[in-house]
Amino acid sequence: MTHYEASFEIDSKTDSYAARRMLERVYDTIREESRSVREGTDDADELLEEFRTLRDAAKRPTPGRLTITYEQFEDEFED
């Protein structure tokens, strides 16, 4: 498994706004994809709830750190 990680330090209101917009965009994208691919499944509902929590947490402008981790598995998708 390959592991990638990036951290974004939030130390100003501008940074906080950028993090909030990023998380809003991610949430909207996952919501739209879930509607077309996984609508009504338990895993889609759980995933949306997790990203909704992240999005809502970023609404209050406070200092912090946003860390994104991507773990790439060696398997391939089935056709």
Image: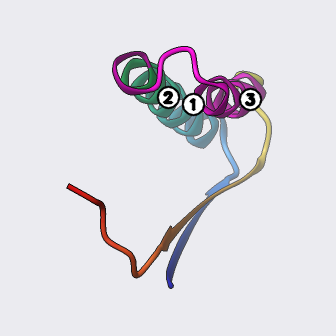
C-alpha gap between disc 3 and disc 1:
7 Å
Foreground residue among 31 and 57? 31
The amino acid type, in three-letter code, at marker 2 is Arg
Q: Residue at x 46, y 29 (%)?
A: 30
Colour mapping used in the image:
rainbow
Task: Tell which circle, 3 or 1, labels the residue nearer the N-terminal end.
Answer: 1
Q: Are marks 3 and 1 in contact (CB under 8 Å)?
A: yes
Where residue 4 sits: x, y (%)? Answer: 49, 76
**Could you tell me which quadrant the C terminus lies in?**
bottom left
- All told, the count of numbered labels is 3
Q: Which residue is at the front of the view, 3 or 75? A: 75
Measure how far apart labels 2 and 1 are at the Cα level: 6 Å
Q: Residues within 10 Å of mark 3 (few under 14, many from 20)?
A: some
Residue 61: numbered disc: 3
Residue 17 shows which numbered tag?
1
Q: Is residue 25 left or right of residue 61?
A: left
Looking at the rendered image, the disc whose residue lies closer to the viewer, 2 or 1, is 2
Reply above or below: 2 against 51.
Answer: below
CA separation, marks 2 and 3? 12 Å
Q: Is residue 73 above or below residue 78?
A: below
SS class, disc 1: helix
Residue linked to disc 2: 21
Q: Nearer the viewer, residue 34 or 24?
A: 34
Kind of residue sitting beneath label 1: Tyr
Q: Look at 78% across and 45% down and name the residue there.
A: 63
Q: What segment carries the magenta color? A: 35-58
Assign a secondary structure to mark 3.
loop
* Horizontal side of residue 67 vs 63, given as left or right: left
Residue 76 appears left or right of 60? left
- Choose mark 2 or mark 3, whichever is in front: 2
Give the percent coordinates (x, y) of residue 45: 65, 23
